[in-house]
Image (cartoon, grey):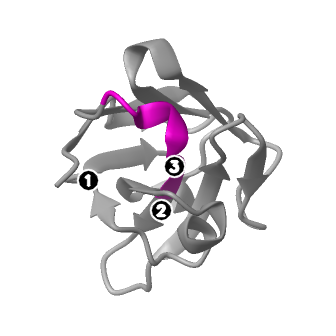
Amino acid sequence: QVQLVQSGGGLVQAGGSLRLSCQASERRFSMYAMGWFRQAPGKLREYVAAISWSGATHYGDFVKGRFTCSRDNAKNTVYLEMNSLKPEDTAVYYCAADTSVSDVKNAVCDHWGQGTQVTVSS
C-alpha cells in the first residue's frame, strides 16, 4: 500500500494563503495521478483538484482560479497552493493517488492520505 503523508494545514484569516503538501512513499510516484478533495462536517466530499503524471491539472468548479495544484516528482510530493481563502473553504483536505487521472477525478483512488484540517476565519 502506498503511504501518503499530508502536512501544511492550519488556521488562517480570510484572504490569506496556505500550502498543503502530500508526500508519497513510492519511488514510482511520477507514474501516479494525484488528487485533492475536501469534506466539511455534515457535507459531502468535494473534488478540489487533480494533476496527471505529466503535470496537467484539473480543478473543481468551486475552487478553480484561487487554488493551484503542482507536483515535484523528485521529492515524491504534490502541493495545493490555496490563495484568497474564504471561510467556506474550511474543511478537512485529503490527497489521493491512482494510476488513472480519470479515476482520481471521480474519487475512486486506490490510496488516500490521512487528511489535514484547514480553518479559515473571517
Residue 34: mark in rendering: 3
Q: Is residue 33 magenta?
A: yes
Mark 2 vs mark 3, foreground winner is 3
Q: Secondary structure at mark 1?
A: loop
Does residue 120 show up magenta in the picture? no
Rate crowding at label 1 as few (under 14), some (14 to 19) or many (20 or more) other CA atoms within 10 Å: many
Instruction: Please state which amino acid type lies under the numbered disc 1.
Output: Gly
Q: Which residue is mark 1?
A: 115
**Amino acid type at mark 2:** Phe
Per the image, label 3 sits on a secondary structure element best described as strand
Question: Image height check: is 33 above or below 71?
Answer: below
Q: Is residue 49 above or below residue 29?
A: below
At 56% from the left and 39% from the top, the residue drawn is 14
Give the left or right position of residue 58, taking residue 94 as reference.
right
Residue that lies at the very extreme toward the top in this rendered image: 74
Relative to the observer, which residue lies in front, 26 or 21? Answer: 26
Percent across and percent down for residue 27 are: 32, 27
Please give the label number shown on residue 37.
Answer: 2
Q: Which residues are magenta?
A: 27-36
- Mark 2, secondary structure of its residue: strand
